[in-house]
Each structure stands twice: as structure tokens, then as C-alpha cells.
Image: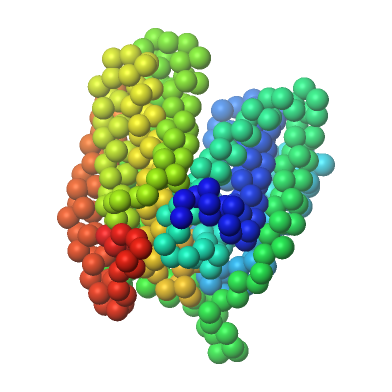
Amino acid sequence: MGAGRLLRDNPAFRTLCTARVVSFAGDSLSLVALMIHVVDTAGQAVAVSLLLLAGDFVPSLVSPVSGAISDRFDLKRVMVTCEVVQGVLIVAIAVALPPLPLLLALVAVRAVAGQIFGPASRSAVPALVDDRDLAPANSALGFGTNAGEAVGPLLAAALFPLLGVRGVLLVDAATFLVSAVLLSTLRPIPPTEHGAGRPSLVSQARSGWAYIWSTRAIRLVLLGFGGVVAFTAVDDVALVVLAKDTFEAGDSAVALLLGAVGLGLLAGFALLARSRIRLGMAALLLAGFAVSSVGNLLTGLAWAVAVAFALQAVRGVGIAAIEVASNTLLQRLVPRDMLGRVFGNLYGVIGVAAAVSYVSGGLLLDATSAPLTFLVAGAGGTVVTVLVALRLPAAVRAHVRDAGRLPDPDRQDDE
């Protein structure tokens, strides 16, 4: 079933998808508002960096526990609670507009709630759609959430003259309320483990890491994804330097290059949502790793803004393939009672890897040049891709065989 038919014929999945799109659009809206507020009040670029770290890196530190929460409690209740908590915190920020230290603390707490929401929403997908529909479902979610993130800054630009920072933040709070109301209409999605004999939350978090580390196929997905991100996530910073220093272009060229990956992402998700995916999910994941890494490698050889734009747009298609393939592969391979912990740790690893890429890539940029930084980033990601490709297909086959699962005749094998 294609994504369009899935959205039309599956009201529960349509509700989940709509709620996530609304929430992501609001997140993007408030991020713009907070960045402008911090620049206006603190007047330092490092303050913006701290804001981004509070929103991206701090939540990754609690990812094992955030995933365990999804495996321990009803997923519908977890998602609704997270949206309400985020909405309340955004209202508090909007009303107080506190000094920077308190603002960073509130942003970090809100981001932790979002970190808990992520594994819960991804774990809910297999409970709402058939196995054969997982790939188009993940494609539809990817397209919708990325479209929401793309629309958010445009909405912010339109609303700022009318509402100011406080008003824009309150609009974001309203999106969390809308999302919570939508999610509350879903049926309960209880955990598979019940009873008073359940281990503690910390023990469940530890068992999640133990499962990942002892399961070769799952471990390779996490290490491969994290390794590629650790090398290639520097592109957001490097593109600015590439446009201004290497191509000697203006701010419009910077904006164009920064938007290229987003356009590629939307195109990739749309393509994967509309078409029958002939590649197995492991092969699609490896193809995404390769396109993302080689795209950065070739960007280091680009001689004009238009060439770099095209390469980064193609790279966005590869990132869309990574997102769809990793989500679908894990949803098929991981036991339901472990799925939240695996997703929580996956996106925790990605958060840490991105932070490593920002820091190490920034140092490399300062010491060398943007083209060399892209070459190193692309080469490193390509090496990670090759190493994972040598092991992942066989690991997936062994995992499926050991689990006693037979291929579904209506879809391709997981590999």
C-alpha cells in the first residue's frame, strides 16, 4: 500500500502523522524565535551554540532511560504526556523570557520530553500499521515532519511582525496542545510486559544497551548510523564557509546551500512514499550511507555554488533513505518490548555523534579549509559505509533466521 492510500485508509496512522507534523512545525517555529531572542539579549554567537546544545546534545545523555519509558508504559499516554509537558514549558518560557541560564535549563528539559516522545512515536508505528506498510508509513512520517520543519521558519517570518517573540512561542505551545488532543483519540498501546515483577527503569535501560551490544545486526545499524553522522554532520557549518570563503558568494548563496539538503530530503521521502521499494531495507540503508558520504566528498571538489547545491540536494535523498531504512529495519527486527530502548539509544548515539562532528569539524575548518573538510568528512563516512556493508547483510540474514521469521511474500526481505 502506498503512503497516500495508507493515510486515507488508516485513521489511527493518519492521526499520528498529523500530530507529528503539527508538533514539528511548532518546534521549528519556536527554535527560530528563541535563536533571535538569544541573539538580541545575549549578543554572542556562543549563546546560540549553547541553545542548540541544550536542545540537541543534552537530551542524548538520557536516551537509554527515555527509550525504557516507551517500553514500560502505554505509548499513547507517554506521547500525550510529553506533548503536554512541552507545551507547558514553552508557555513558561514565553511568559517569563528568563535570563540565559534559566532559559537553557528550560529548553533542555523541554528537549528531554521531546527525546522521550521520539522513541514512543516510532515504537507506535508497528502497532498502527501492517508490517508490509512500515516503509511507506515511515516515508510519510519523514516527509510530513521535514515539511513541517521547513514551513516553521517561514511561519515565524510571517508571525514575528504581528506577534513578537512571546506570541510566536505561544503559537508553538498551541501546536503541542493540538498534537496532544489528536493523540488522545488513539486507542491505548500498552507495553508487552506487565506485572509487579518488572525490573526498575534503570535496569530496563541497562538491558536495552545489553541487547543492542549483544545483537550484531542491531549493533551494526547503530554504529554505522552514528559513524556516518560523526563524519558528515559538519556540513551545516562547512557550507557557510564554503559559500563565503571558497566561492566568495553572498548570504543568498549560503541560504541556498543550506536549503539544498532539506529539498533533497523532501524529494527523497516523497519518492520513497509513492513508489514500491525494491531494495531490501539493509541495502537501502547502505545506499543512503553511501550517497550521504559521497555527496560530501564530491562537494569538496565542487567549483561553483550550483554544483555544490546539486550535490547536497542528492545527499538529502540519501539521508531520507537512511531515515526510512533504519526505522523500518529496526521495527521489523527488534522485539516489541525492546523497541523503545533501541530507538532511544539510536537517536542518543546520533545526538552525540553530531556534537562530535560539530566540534571536530569546526576545528578542522579553522585549521584548513571548507573543501578539505568536506573531503575528510566524505572519505570518513565512505569508510564507515564500506565497513558496515561487509557485515550488515549477513548479520540481518542471521538475525532473521535465528528469530525463525519467514519472509513475507508481499514484501522484499529485510536485507
Residue 46 x %, y %? 55, 32
Residue 42 x %, y %? 66, 29
Question: In this orientation, does residue 345 appear?
Answer: no
> What's the residue at 76%, 45% (across, down)?
174
Residue nearer the viewer, 405 or 299? 405
> What's the residue at 33%, 14% (across, down)?
304
Residue nearer the viewer, 149 or 273? 273
> What's the residue at 23%, 71% (across, down)?
398
Residue projecting furthest to the left:
390
Residue 12 x %, y %? 62, 61
> What's the residue at 35%, 34% (across, down)?
315
64 in relation to 326, above or below: below
83 in relation to 212, above or below: above
Residue 238 x %, y %? 39, 27
In the rendered image, the quadrant that contains the C terminus is bottom left
Q: Is 316 situated left or right of 169 in this image?
A: left
Q: In terms of image quadrants, where is residue 290?
A: top left
The colour scheme used here is: rainbow
Q: In terms of image quadrants, where is residue 162?
A: top right
